[in-house]
Image (cartoon, coloured by chain):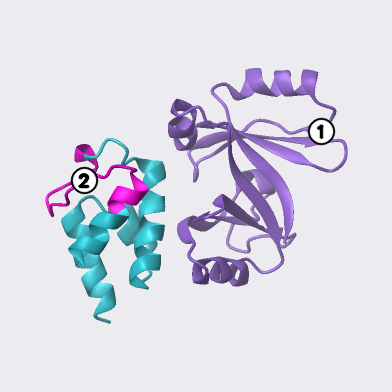
Amino acid sequence: MKEKLQDIFREVFDDETIVLDPQMTAEDIEAWDSLTHFELVMEVETAFGIRLTTGEIAGLESVGQLMELIEKHMGK
Amino acid sequence: MRLHHIGIAVKSIRRQAEEYKRILETVHVSEIVYDSVQKAWLCMIEQTGGSALELVEGEPVEKYLSKGIRMYHMCYEVEELETEMERILQNGGVLVSGPEAAVLFDGRRVAFLYTKAGLIELLEEGRKNEAG
């Protein structure tokens, strides 16, 4: 899952050097802002076949959180 | 589902509204209103031919302006808001906000969704929000 998510991050933020770490936040990726945030969520939802809630999307601040949410929704 | 307006991010709504009035053939320019839900100042400009532009100033559009983006959302008027929302969500869209009553549209509800086609606003037809 991490590798798939990393591919999404590299694609959305147009940066092949991104190596995901659960501690990583928007502070660590320059292009991760309020606009690309929704693009990221959209790509994640499509790739993993899940749908995050509006609250989860708004509260999403780190890669680790996103990985937990993916696992949670895929486990349903 | 019909195109209702195009959203334009502006630094100064008052100055930009004057510019649009000078440059475009406008039939109506609304009052500038503050939408506390969107945390933005809004002004609707109706043009001859039936098209409309919504000028938006404030926090929600600052990031667009910093990237040089002016036209940033398309608004579609729909009969059944929830039905259209669900259709877009089923097709990969992400709900950004709403549905919420919009002060610029006399309490008619709007929802914003991020899609592969960009940011889309859905505006419910005619019916007013009973709660608002």
Dot 2 lies on which element?
A: loop
**Magenta residues (range):** A9-28
User: Which residue is at a point 34% across and 57% down the rendered structure image?
Assistant: A57
User: Which residue is at a point 24% across and 40% down the rendered structure image?
Assistant: A29
Mark number for residue A50?
A: none
Residue B11 visible in image:
yes
Dot 1 lies on which element?
A: strand
Q: Amino acid at mark 1?
A: His
Chain A, hue in figure: cyan
Q: Which residue occupies the foreground of this view, A15 or B23? A: A15
Residue B93, horizontal then vertical, whole percent: 49, 62
Q: Main secondary structure of the magenta part?
A: loop
- Chain of the residue on which disc 1 is drawn: B
Chain B, hue in figure: purple
Crowding around mark 2 (Cα neighbors within 10 Å: few <14, some 14 to 19, many 20+) is some
Q: Measure the C-alpha gap from mark 1 to mark 2.
A: 49 Å
Mark number for residue A18?
A: 2
- Chain of the residue on which disc 2 is drawn: A
Horizontal side of A21 relative to A34 (left or right) equals: left
Residue B95, horizontal then vertical, whole percent: 46, 59
In what quadrant of the picture does the C terminus of chain A appear? bottom left
Q: Amino acid at mark 2?
A: Ile
Q: Is residue B64 above or below residue B131?
A: above
Mark number for residue B28?
A: 1
User: Which residue is at a point 68% across and 55% down the rendered structure image?
Assistant: B76
